[in-house]
Image (cartoon, grey):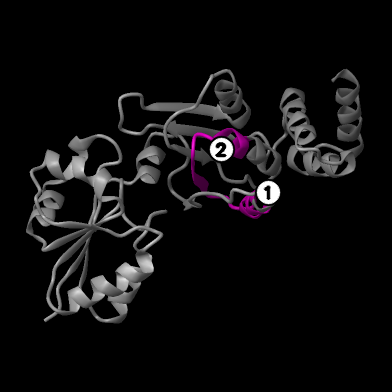
Amino acid sequence: MSGTLYIVATPIGNLEDMTFRAVRILKEVDLIAAEDTRHSKKLLGHYGITTPAIACHEYNETQKAHDLIQRLETGTTIALISDAGTPLISDPGYRLVSQAQEKGIPIVPVPGCNAALTGLSASGLPTDSFIFLGFPPKKQGRLESFLNDAARHKATLIFYESPRRIMRLISSAIMAFGDRQACLARELTKQYEEFIPGPLSLILSTLEVREIVKGECVLFIKGADEQPADLSSDQIEIMIMDGLNQDMRTGELAKKIAELANRPKPKVYDMILALKKRS
């Protein structure tokens, strides 16, 4: 008989968030496939888990999946873990799980932490419907297209982003969505955990005055309303400045903001020209 593949969630920061079942499974399996064995060493050592571990990450997953499937077929039990949270959620493991399913190998999820749901529960945004969009594209052109496609969704939007690119994401989101209500969660479950709720412009201005932004970030943005929002003049000015900073053409910028702000395009055009003269 084949072995079982366990998909084991681990803490996203606070080691106390490990479940009793996860500890037991990691002690009982024959092998642990970890995203980074060096990173997981601290967690395994904390709970006295001595099970052998091998690396299975995005760069070697194709080859490792083949090797692990062979072991599973001969009866080896394996636990898959990522660096933090639930495996496969913006982490490696899809190829392994997909191939195991094709081979009829038993797959057992062991639930636990997930940064998206952990942050959503405290974001203050609607939780009845949400869309997880993971890490957005790094190139600006692809990012803008990605956000424009996401703008129509009425569900709460969830993004993962690195601290180096979080301000660029928020600035681009303002242009794609308008100044929507949002919440930034940073360093979830860790000592310096932080939630910054409010309009996207407020979150951006909060980060801009800091010398550096640290920790992995989860950004939650309210979904689209049925009708375009009536934004204030100050909010429209923020959108205009973001657009000018991205070197958007005046006509293109006026059209986009007019649609988002529910204002006549000529009036927005005049606002852009006035801001250009002032700056």
**Which segment did they paint magenta?**
143-170
Residue 54: percent from left, percent from top: 23, 58
Circle 1 residue: 144
The kind of secondary structure element at disc 1 is helix
Residue 125 against residue 101 in the figure, above or below: above
Is residue 4 toward the left or the right of residue 264 in the image?
left
Q: Is residue 274 left or right of residue 153?
A: right
Measure how far apart labels 2 and 1 are at the Cα level: 14 Å
Q: Which residue is mark 2?
A: 165
Q: Is residue 140 above or below residue 57?
A: above
User: Closer to us: mark 2 or mark 1?
Assistant: 2
Cβ atoms at labels 2 and 1 below 8 Å apart: no
Looking at numbered disc 1 in the image, what kind of residue is underneath it? Glu
- Kindly identify the residue that appears in the image at 91 percent across and 30 percent down: 270
> Magenta span has 259?
no
Residue 256 position within the rendered picture, expressed as x and y whole percent measured from the top left: 79, 44
Location of residue 101 by image quarter = bottom left
The amino acid beneath tag 2 is Arg
Element carrying mark 2: loop
Q: Identify which residue, 58 or 198, lies in the foreground.
A: 58
Using residue 176 as the reference point, say whether residue 258 is left or right of it. right
Query: Is residue 162 rendered magenta in the image?
Result: yes
Looking at the picture, how far across and down is residue 208, in whole percent? 59, 22
